[in-house]
Image: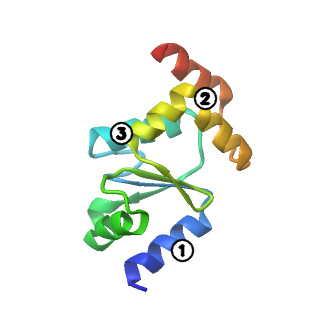
Amino acid sequence: MTDATTQIKDTITKNDVVLFMKGTKSMPQCGFSSRVAGVLNYMEIDYADVNVLADENIRQGIKDYSDWPTIPQLYVKGEFVGGCDIITEMMLSGELDTLFAENNVKFDKEAADKIREANG
């Protein structure tokens, strides 16, 4: 097991929600990362952010780990959920609310509803 794989497993095991992204949750450095972080921030999700631009081994390692070619990548309770398009679809359909609720992840339901209203 590589150091990157060990670090990734450790991060997704110790945190209920993890976003591997370009940049940080307070300063995303790509549009796709910004969109997902924006949704999570607006919903007041407590999540760990991992800046893949800070470590090339993690940047490639997360793609290998999930067998998913793009960043950002969202994990909930150790399970890979998806990238920007999947998270956006899940947000708009209400599936993301359900996923968080089923995994006992606190979120602002009113904020989630406002996102859907604004995009409906």
* Quarter of image, res 86: top left
**Marks 1/2: CA distance?**
29 Å
Q: Confirm or deny contact between disc 1 and disc 3 (CB under 8 A).
A: no
Q: Amino acid at mark 3?
A: Ser
Position of the N terminus, as image quadrant, is bottom left
Q: 49 left or right of 69?
A: right
State the residue position of label 1. 10
Instruction: Tell me the crowding category of disc 1: few under 14, some 14 to 19, or many 20 or more residues within 10 angstroms, Cα based.
Output: few
Q: 1 left or right of 54?
A: right
The image position of residue 76, as x and y in percent, is 58, 54
State the residue position of label 3. 34
Q: Relative to 107, say whether 52 is above or below.
A: below
Q: Confirm or deny contact between disc 1 and disc 2 (CB under 8 A).
A: no
Instruction: Tell me the crowding category of disc 3: few under 14, some 14 to 19, or many 20 or more residues within 10 angstroms, Cα based.
Output: many
**Marks 2/3: CA distance?**
20 Å
Which residue is at a point 33% across and 52% down the rendered structure image?
71
Q: Amino acid at mark 2?
A: Gly
State the residue position of label 2. 94
Q: Relative to 44, say whether 92 is above or below.
A: above
Instruction: Tell me the crowding category of disc 2: few under 14, some 14 to 19, or many 20 or more residues within 10 angstroms, Cα based.
Output: few
Which residue is at a point 58% across and 62% down the rendered structure image?
78
